[in-house]
Amino acid sequence: MARYWLGGVALLLCACGGASDEEASVDRARCEFTPSELGFDEQSPIGVSAASCLEGILGARECTWSWNDPGQLGARVPSPGETTASVELSYRGGSVVYLEGKRVGGSSLERLACPSSLEVTTTLRIETADGVLHREFELPLECASLGYAQASVDVQSEDLQGYAFEWAEAWPYTSRRLALLAEPSRVVSGLLREEAHHESVQTGETTSFDGVVFRSAEWWCLPE
């Protein structure tokens, strides 16, 4: 479970090269999460329930959808510009799971936080006015103690119509994800991001990779 919100149009993520045999044998810090099922109205140990997390962010809204310019990173269809999107987040009786985070291994010098959270399975429907995206996704929404909620899900080529992206540089691994962020002010926003990387490294509950991320599209919805 990789937990990050990407804040730039392009972001270089680095795993800092290959590790020597000696470095590979070091017990590095990692996160482990213990799941516990809860009821929809049951308060979790971090002080939020599924009901309180989803309050104010469920329902349909009209949003602005912006296609970003990839510049020298690659080529994409459609062209850069703005359109609108109908976005609806709903709860249809999905699972509610409290994830208790625990840091294990490593030294005190390593910076790694493992916050606990509440994960609620929701349904996200997005329909862009230009017809590129018209799809429902099952979305595991992660609720934090400070009023933020976020989630991301893989997007396949068949989920998009009239969309194509080609990296200028050849990468051995590429992927595409749709992300959502809900803030305490109940502003809901998100992005469609293209990811390219040399090698994926999975260690416990932490994923890192050496590559590039391009925010192909961003969308935001103001409170009603």
Image (cartoon, rainbow, N blue to C red):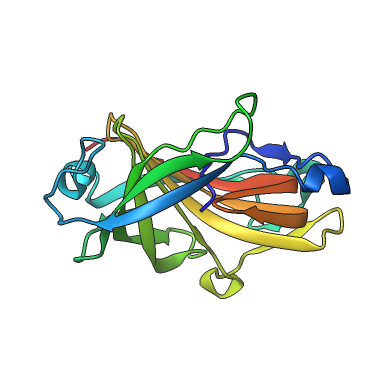
Residue drawn at (60%, 71%), measured in percent from left and top? 157
Would residue 151 be visible to someone looking at this image?
Answer: yes
> How far across and how far down the image is residue 29, in percent?
61, 39
> How far across and how far down the image is residue 93, in percent?
19, 66
Residue drawn at (50%, 33%), measured in percent from left and top? 113
> How far across and how far down the image is residue 14, in percent?
76, 40
Residue 97 vertical position relative to residue 63 in the rendered view, above or below: below
Would residue 18 be visible to someone looking at this image?
Answer: no
Residue drawn at (60%, 28%), measured in percent from left and top? 111
Residue with the most extreme top position: 109
Location of residue 220 by image quarter: top left
User: Count of labels shown?
Assistant: 0
Taking 102 as reference, is 24 left or right?
Answer: right
Location of residue 183 by image quarter: top left
Residue drawn at (21%, 43%), measured in percent from left and top? 44
- State which quarter of the image contains the C terminus: top left
Taking 134 as reference, is 176 left or right?
Answer: right
Residue 86 vertical position relative to residue 26 in the rendered view, above or below: below
Taking 190 as reference, is 70 left or right?
Answer: right
Between 124 and 1, the residue placed more toward the observer is: 1
Residue with the most extreme left position: 41
Between 8 and 140, the residue placed more toward the observer is: 140
> How far across and how far down the image is residue 212, in percent?
74, 45
Location of residue 171 by image quarter: bottom right
